[in-house]
Amino acid sequence: MKAIIIYYSMSGNVKNTAERIAAETGADLLALHPVKSYPDKGAKKFIWGGKSALMGDKPKLQPYIFNADKYDTVIFGSPVWASSFTPPIRTFIEDNRQALEGKRFASVLCQLGNGDKKANKKLKKVLGVEELAAELVLIEPNAKPKEETESSILEFCGKLKSIDDQG
């Protein structure tokens, strides 16, 4: 399996999780950065992020390199904002729709409380798929005990590896 984890991370939860998964699976990493950053503190963080997610915004991204031909599996990593994945992920999918055709998809979501089920449902809809190969949901992984987070990550990686072994 050659996989890439394409992610957006504001507070480091998704970034740290993506790096751990990459270390376990050998996946490549691609961090997305919007040209105009979102507020990352106080009420503005939740208001702007939530509004952008609810409205289906597609922010312009800083340049990145993505060669879809190198990958069988694309793992999207995102915080959950207003029961949705983040706008930078939406922009990436829209900008690379043709290149993503025929790929296997998985998701890694980090959240403060809930909303992951709706976020994954929205992600599947935007990707045009019925199912994701694997889903990982973590609640505040940077603040949780390492053992709990590590166990969930290893289970997710195992699922990815078993799916790859099956074909």
Image (cartoon, rainbow, N blue to C red):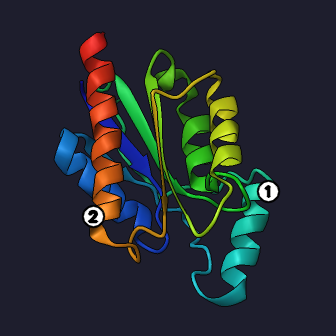
Q: Does residue 73 sit above or below 11 in this rendering?
A: above
Instruction: Please give left or right for residue 99 compared with residue 39 in the image.
Output: left
The x and y percentages for residue 160 are 32, 30
Instruction: Please give left or right for residue 99 compared with residue 150 in the image.
Output: right
Kindly indicate the quadrant of the structure image that contains residue 26: top left
Residue 54: which disc?
1
Q: Earlier in the sequence, mark 1 or mark 2?
A: 1
The x and y percentages for residue 45 are 66, 79
Q: Which residue is pictured at 48% across the width and 41% down the height?
A: 107
Residue identifier under label 2: 147
Q: Nearer the viewer, residue 145 or 65?
A: 145
**Secondary element at tag 2:** helix
Q: Nearer the viewer, residue 143 or 6?
A: 143
Q: Which residue is pictured at 24% across the width and 40% down the height?
A: 27
Q: Amino acid at mark 1?
A: Leu
Q: Nearer the viewer, residue 79 or 35?
A: 79
Q: Which residue is pictured at 36% across the width and 44% down the height?
A: 5
The x and y percentages for residue 58 are 68, 51
Q: Which residue is pictured at 71% across the width and 83% down the height?
A: 44
| Quadrant of the snapshot with the N terminus | top left
| Quadrant of the snapshot with the C terminus | top left
Q: Amino acid at mark 2?
A: Glu
The x and y percentages for residue 86 are 61, 56
Q: Does residue 143 sit above or below 75 in this rendering?
A: below
Q: Residues within 10 Å of mark 2 (few under 14, many from 20)?
A: few
**Secondary element at tag 1:** helix
Disc 1 and disc 2: Cα gap in Å? Answer: 34 Å
Q: Residue furthest bottom?
A: 42
